[in-house]
Amino acid sequence: MIEEECLKPEYLLQHLPVSVVIARHRIIVNCNARALTMFRASEEQIIGASFALLYPEQKDFESAAEHFAPLLSRHAEFHDDRIMRRLDGTHFWVTVRGYGFNEDNPYELAAWVFTDVADPASAEKVSLTARERDVAALLVDGLTSKEAAKKLGISPRTVDIHRASLLRKYAVGSTPELIRRIVA
């Protein structure tokens, strides 16, 4: 038999099998333990903070607002693969889903679900290989090929091969352009 305690919303939120963040006007007001682990954060660091904290740059936070608002206001089913920032400064790929509770003001109260794209349990398919995602995230972190290779335990030449593949897939001519496209 299920205890009454288990039916309380806070208990349910904390025990969901996905990372969930609740925000009012893009300020984080609640999240579950899985989200804290995913973003390598403590409650003290994240509760009351702007969602901007979790984006690689302020411009990414702003462009996401423009991208998601129409979807949230229509209660559209959507997902978006993007690079987010952990509080330790590293970047990683996630699939984002959201729900705005007020169609007229979608950011008044919104719930967000994050799935780590590198997580084998993730059912989402992306156009990049796991290694390309790893290399892309390290490039966004500002690492050189040599530094990325050391972190991944591969040769710098292999990193360069993956970088060339990323440049082709994103149809760009330079690493700075690639990084702009990845975080857009």
Image (cartoon, rainbow, N blue to C red):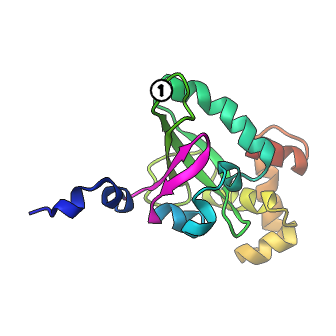
Q: Quadrant of residue 60?
A: top right
Picture residue at 54% right of the left edge, 46% below the top: 23
Picture residue at 52% right of the left edge, 25% below the top: 73
Q: Is residue 35 above or below residue 71?
A: below
Q: Mark 1: which secondary structure?
A: loop
Residue 140: image location, x then y, percent: 79, 57
Residue 167 visible to the viewer: no
Binning the other alpha carbons within 10 Å of mark 1 as few (below 14), some (14 to 19) or many (20 upward) gives few
Residue 93: image location, x then y, percent: 63, 54
Is 145 left or right of 114, judged from the image as shown? Answer: right
Mark 1 residue type: Ala
Q: Magenta part mainly helix, strand or loop?
A: strand
Residue 31 visible to the viewer: yes
Residue stretch in magenta = 17-33
Picture residue at 54% right of the left edge, 35% below the top: 108
Is 29 left or right of 159, judged from the image as shown? Answer: left
* Residue sitting nearer the eye, 18 or 123: 18
Provide the residue designation for mark 1: 76
Residue 46: image location, x then y, percent: 60, 61
Q: Is residue 20 above or below residue 63?
A: below
Is 1 left or right of 108, judged from the image as shown? Answer: left
* Residue sitting nearer the eye, 93 or 86: 86
Judge whether residue 25 is colored magenta.
yes
Q: Is residue 68 above or below residue 24?
A: above
Q: Residue furthest front?
A: 48
Q: In the rendered view of the protein, which quadrant contains the C terminus?
A: top right
Q: Quadrant of residue 2?
A: bottom left
Picture residue at 76% right of the left edge, 49% below the top: 166
Judge whether residue 30 is colored magenta.
yes
* Residue sitting nearer the eye, 174 or 182: 182
Q: Is residue 69 above or below residue 115?
A: above
> How many numbered marks are there?
1
